[in-house]
Amino acid sequence: MIIGLIGFGKVSKNLFNLIKSDDIQFVTSFENRSSKTIEHIKKTDIEVFDSFKEVAVNSDILISATSPGSALDVAKNYGKYCDGIYLDLNNISPDTTFEIAGSVKNLVDGAIIGKIDSENPILYVAGKKSDDLQFLNEFITTKKISDNIGDAAILKLLRSSYTKTLSALLIESSEIARKNNLEDEFFEILALTEGDEFREKSISRINNTLDNSKRKSEELNQIIDYFDDEELIMVKAALKKLNR
Amino acid sequence: MIIGLIGFGKVSKNLFNLIKSDDIQFVTSFENRSSKTIEHIKKTDIEVFDSFKEVAVNSDILISATSPGSALDVAKNYGKYCDGIYLDLNNISPDTTFEIAGSVKNLVDGAIIGKIDSENPILYVAGKKSDDLQFLNEFITTKKISDNIGDAAILKLLRSSYTKTLSALLIESSEIARKNNLEDEFFEILALTEGDEFREKSISRINNTLDNSKRKSEELNQIIDYFDDEELIMVKAALKKLNR
């Protein structure tokens, strides 16, 4: 089996390390690649073709793991040459996934949940062809969501809407507790029901959100746009909170 | 030492069982009590006085654990006769606690966090006189918050504003997930970061909130009234969510 890689960042690198085995040949290309990435690839036994077109033509599975902004271009430029499975692992919106579906034959949309370099990352996949990816369970837990292209991207959005809104709630609650000089006690009593690490996890979430509030706001806007539901009261409040 | 009990519901009963010991005599009265409560008390070795006035006069610590609606009356009627510590354990607002402070000499306001009949309930106490309650640590973990009367009630309110708003968020997120046929997967992927029991705990919170939405709304209204802060964006959204 031949697996082609477009993109050689954290996701591709870790997937390569997890999946490499005697029966699987990885292939990629140096086309338009930085010298740093070329150096990284040279240290592996990945086979290098002259072009990504050639990579696409020869792959049983073509993995696109580049950046959200280039995912659609990659699909349009190379997806059409791929008769195998086109596995998109970019962090893109469901709408972009639907657009990509128009350019490639056997799309599977995937989402890695949990850090790819952690102990137990899980690969969620959606689309009819994701049945053919079950063999990956030998290397990384691989769960099929459904036959519906886009479901992996929607699932990421659902997760993101919960965690970002929770962060906004933590910001607000700890702020009111602090104003009443009860911040320590607030975290302490909630740890009784929310788990011992509540304080530590909460502070990390609060700081991560405040440090990236512009990006988090943009992501909340995307969530609100995509689901377009008047019931999204909490998510909209989170956006309002972050914009303060 | 003599501890007087006004109210003999779950809190008083469990405190009595936790604290009873050779050096401590519990006292109470049958005044205005139901026959059922009288039966309960008769099964214990609690000493019974003719009136709560007598109980108040004779107690080193007088514990009021009745109902939120009668806490203020109890304090006004009997608190003035108590020269010992008056420990209020009713689930009341900080404003009611401040009113009670006007009627009794040595008020300590307390909050039991965690179920009183669970393994590790914690008694939080506030007020200058709460130093004198540290001996209770022999029987139940007893933490002093501060010298400020009302801090225990405020702490309960902070906890309540977090947990109720979280429930509103869970209701909204699971609703959107369900509309997208991804409810199971939503709970599954969040369990990876929120803990194995995330699904079970979330569903219990959602049901508890929906089954008592009128009362939860009232409590959210009290929180909004008490803190009276324009930054309470998430809590106000939770109220809006519950009113749907």
Image (cartoon, coloured by chain):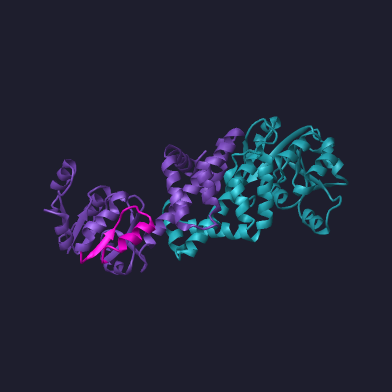
Chain colours: A purple, B cyan
Q: Is residue B175 rendered magenta in the image?
A: no
Q: At 82% from the left edge and 43% from the top edge, which residue is drawn?
A: B73
**Residue B215's spot in the image, x, y percent?**
69, 54
Q: Is residue B97 left or right of residue B230?
A: right
> Could you say which is closer to the camera, residue A4 or residue A18?
A4
> Could you say which is closer to the camera, residue A142 or residue B12?
A142
Q: Is residue A42 left or right of residue A126?
A: left
> Could you say which is closer to the camera, residue B136 or residue A62?
A62
Q: Quadrant of residue A122?
A: bottom left
Q: Is residue A98 rendered magenta in the image?
A: yes
Q: Is residue A109 left or right of residue B161?
A: left
Q: Quadrant of residue B186?
A: bottom left
**Residue A119's spot in the image, x, y percent?**
32, 51
The C terminus of chain B appears in which quarter of the rendering?
Answer: bottom right
The N terminus of chain B appears in which quarter of the rendering?
Answer: top right
Q: Is residue A179 left or right of residue A51?
A: right
Residue at the right extreme? B50
Q: Quadrant of residue A25?
A: bottom left
* Residue extent of the magenta highlight: A82-105
Q: At 47% from the left edge and 61% from the top edge, which residue is drawn?
A: B177
One can see residue A129 in this view: yes
One can see residue B190 in this view: no
Position of residue B130 relative to residue B202, above or below, is above
> Could you say which is closer to the camera, residue B71 or residue A47?
A47
**Residue A145's spot in the image, x, y percent?**
38, 65
**Residue B41's spot in the image, x, y percent?**
78, 53
Q: At 57% from the left edge and 43% from the top edge, which residue is drawn?
A: A189
Q: How many marks?
A: 0
